[in-house]
Image (cartoon, rainbow, N blue to C red):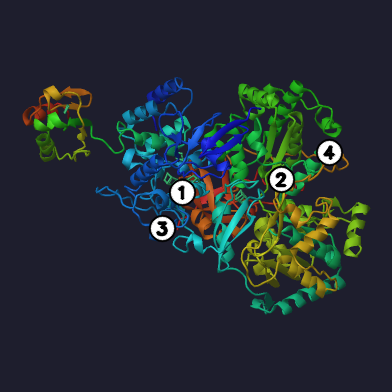
Amino acid sequence: MFNETSIKEIEEIRTKYPNSRAALLPVLYVAQREFGWLSPEAYEAVADLLNVPKATARGVGTFYAMYKQKPMGRHLIQLCTNVSCMILGAEKLVDFLKSKYGIEPGGMSPDGRFSLVIMECIGACGTAPAMLVNDNFYENLDKKNLEEILGKYQ
Amino acid sequence: MKIITITINGKEIKLEKAVTVLEAARSAGIKIPTLCYHEQLERYGGCRLCLVEVEKMPRLQTACTLMVTDGMVVRTETEQIADVRRGILEFLLINHPLDCPYCDKAGECDLQDLVERYGPAKGRFKEKKRKVKESLADSAIVRNMERCIMCTRCVRMCEGKQGASAIAVIDRGGHSHIEPFSGGKFDCEYCGNCVSVCPVGAIMSRLHRHSYRPWQVKEQHETVCPYCGVGCTVVAQVRDDVIMRVIPKLGSAVNNGMLCSRGRFGYEFVGSKDRLTVPLIRKNGMLTEATWEEAITLVAKKLSDIKVTFSSQAIAGISSLRCTNEDNYVFQKFMRAAVGTNNIDTTARTGFAGAQGFIENIFGQGATANIISGLANSDTVLVIGGDPTTVNPILGLQIRACARRNGNVLTIGNVEGLRNFNPSKLLPKLQTEVTLLEGIVTALREKKGLPGSNAALEAKIKDITISADEVTRKTGVAETEFLTFVDLLADAATFSLVIGKDIVQSSGGSYKLLLLSAINYLANGRIYLLSERANEQGALDMGCAPDILPGYRPVAYPEFRKKCENVWHTELSDKPGLNLFEMVDAAEQGRLKAVYVMGENPLCNIPDSGRVETAFKKLDFLVVQDIFLTETAKLANVVLPALSWAEKDGTFTNMERRIQRVRKAVHREGMDDWKIIAEISKNMGYNMDYKGAEDVFHEAAKVSPLLRGLTYEDIENGDNIYPYKGEPLRDAMEEIQADRSARSVKSGTLYLKIERPLFHSGTMSTKAPALINIYPEAVARIGAGTAQALSLTEGDVVRVKTKTGSLALFVAIEKNDDNLSVKISNNFEGKSAFRLTDCNLDPVTKAPCLDGIEITIEKVTA
Ligand code: SF4
Ligand code: SF4
Ligand code: SF4
Ligand code: FES
Ligand code: FES
């Protein structure tokens, strides 16, 4: 299931914790990176590798928002719609993402290119509206620059 | 010791040790409401319902987690507390569907009771309630997450006590719910212990869904589980002579509130439509309904005739490991006194009897009668020859508990049920166990020296020398692993050895038992011999064996014979009779003319069952007394319907040799097994007049030194365990014989392995719908590697073949299998693994060797 590098990485992680259960969180990250999301198979692979019960692995994984429980697009848009961003038009951007790319909040574009997660303030209120695409930060968004930015993510 | 004094609601309570405030209150009869607390589980402090006021503490405290300290002053019912409880309950009801009128839990629901007592009359929340679909994916358990209050009792039970970790809290906050991994089906051990602890109607048994309300249960009867040799206490709740459900009992000695799937969900065979109701007599080749009188007269006459025409020795009896001690006692007495033969045996002969005899011959009688719960307190447990968590599940839990307490759990071979507990395991190559065990004996002897207390055993092991190097070369076990393993054994202070049937039923079995006995001796441990049937030990102790009388005393000893002769008013033969396998031989050769089978299904349960069938067909007269028309019964001349476990009184003796009362729970027309036998006996001119089961027990207690004059009153609480009072009886030590011949094996060949599943026990469990739904049919279980190599997928139909026989089965694929074996169980009539095995016996234990049987597997194309 896991590729060689991941297995090595997991073994390495494993040595940093007193028991395999404690290593669950970082190993779930490795799984998410490798499989894109935590599918039942991914949970099972983690459980097998760490010899923890698979229900326990899934219980832990579903507790945290950072672990994805469904397939994700190639790129993850995390757009803020909290107060400042909302006042400055974030909701229109949500509509735009829907009409232009077919992405619903919490969903994925039909071509599998983008996933959209709505955030509650990412600390950029002064330069709202703001978003993250994968690990990159963008501010002062409007439809035009949003389209431009997303164009870089194929 | 310092006494701790605390005051609760003005009442002074003195405590010898520090407990929680909740426990202190309960001990003084003060009730504090709780939801997440459960006496079997780790403390959690999640629901906050048990909040109490403690003087000098700023905030309310949870009584279930707070430990008492000297001088503490606690109040449990104040205005402030009532307010808080009301608030908590209001919160708990935000998402609750309030469907009590429709919910099976109503009447015994903690939430309902608490809301009724403390709760708000009305909630203030206007928001929509969360909707979660009830899961009906399983036949045994229903999951309704709208009613869940997130106390996590089920999860703590499944993980911390059952050790299955099959369920978890999924998601968080208001979306949290309890789910098995699949999200739908539990696919778990189906012990139902989560059902026991759920305080509300969120996880419930499906067996009695919408069929009654708790207050409609009119009677309940404490009795013993009918399935395996652990002998768990169960409570059968009954309405109108129907068992509504079976539940465990907190505080019971063997299983303390826990059950396995068979014990909890396997009771419905009692009310099965397939139960036999009237006697059947074969007329013109057909089994035809008859009256009791006809049937009894016919059996008596036929047996008497055969006795006269041939001899008593032409008749044999097979009695039951599921019938009570009383049934078995009367049956063997009937065979010995009325028929006049020692030709009596049980299927305990297929392993348990021989292994126990072998071990007792080394260590004395009672060597295998050890307290099951003691396993949890051992510092080291070695498991070999099977998976205790499926054969004797509640015993298996004790091994898991040992691991949880940081005990060392060691296994030789893969033990799937212990996988989550990371046992230290050695995996010797096929047929190299002997070398491995010899290596362990050598190393232990060198490390610890011979204790000098058992000359016979020491004579056998003093010259064994197998070096670690040789172990590695022959068995493939890495030297470091071997050495660590041996160190753990050598360092054990309290050692337990658990022996499963796979070792007993293997070539060289007696020699392996010798080596295991030696390991146990050197490590100063106790032996647990897994037992698959509820009264396997009892049937043996009652003398249902060709060479022993009640009390496990040899027929050859004149003084014991005398004792029985005096009570039975007859003369007894000093010659051991035919054992189970010799009966089959004798029937095949025409020497045996009649067989009386009580509560057993030889066609399924004796290896090489094809041959058993041919042999039984040659009999002049076959009587089968059973609760179902089994494969064997279908061959019978007379079939006698018996009462089941739930319908009669008596006793079972479990593998600890604990004698426990089986109590009648439901009434059904018919006769107890012993009663039927007594009637036939009377018709043969040998009177047996017992007023009831107790009367039978009374007589057995007179004859059997194992019962030592016990009465039903003495065993009322189930705390009578061999050796009752005082020292175990010791047999004269004979020289130890053991046979070490091992069947040869080739690599690249598949071998048959007997599967001993968790969800079935004999063929009786196949009449329990809940268990059948979980494990519906006979399968050939193969490893993923084997499946791939043979291009087989789950559900394919295959033909498996051995030298002895062949079967068509569905394929089931196991991820963690060793890929060397094809596992088949013998729970399904007509598809029993024993159709595929021969029946070569170990010359010493007389147990069949079921290893090294080559098997081929081939896809059947439709
Ligand atoms: S039935 Fe037993 S194994 Fe299954 S989830 Fe409940 S407690 Fe766990
Ligand atoms: S299912 Fe029952 S036991 Fe489990 S958390 Fe919910 S209410 Fe508690
Ligand atoms: S462990 Fe054995 S005796 Fe106990 S409930 Fe299960 S089958 Fe019955
Ligand atoms: S409100 Fe959008 S970044 Fe703070
Ligand atoms: S019972 Fe004490 S917090 Fe739940």
Residue B344: percent from left, percent from top: 79, 59
Query: Which badge, 2 or 4, is on the more N-terminal residue?
Result: 2
What residue appears at the point 48 percent right and 39 percent down from the top-left corner?
B156
Task: Read off the residue under disc 4.
Answer: B736
Whether the residues at callouts 2 and 3 have beta carbons within 8 Å, the answer is no
- Disc 3 residue type (three-letter): Cys
Task: Read off the residue under disc 2.
Answer: B656
Q: Secondary structure at mark 4?
A: loop
Mark 4 chain: B
> In the image, is residue B384 above or below residue A33?
below
Report, in whole angstroms, how far the alpha carbon at label 1 lies from the one at label 4. 55 Å
Does the image show residue B630?
yes
Task: Read off the residue under disc 3.
Answer: B103
- Disc 2 residue type (three-letter): Glu
Task: Read off the residue under disc 1.
Answer: B199
Q: Secondary structure at mark 3?
A: loop
Question: Is B793 displayed left or right of A66 in the figure?
Answer: right
Report, in whole angstroms, how far the alpha carbon at label 1 lies from the one at label 2. 33 Å
Whether the residues at callouts 1 and 3 have beta carbons within 8 Å, the answer is no
Whether the residues at callouts 1 and 2 have beta carbons within 8 Å, the answer is no
Q: For the residue with label 1, is its CB less than 8 Å from the closest atom of ligand 2?
A: yes
What residue appears at the point 39 percent right and 60 percent down from the top-left corner?
B102
Q: Residue furthest left?
A: A144
Q: Residue furthest front?
A: B10
Whether the residues at callouts 2 and 4 have beta carbons within 8 Å, the answer is no
Q: Which is more foreground, mark 4 or mark 3?
A: 3
Query: Which badge, 1 or 3, is on the more N-terminal residue?
Result: 3
Residue B148: percent from left, percent from top: 39, 47
Report, in whole angstroms, how far the alpha carbon at label 2 lies from the one at label 4. 24 Å
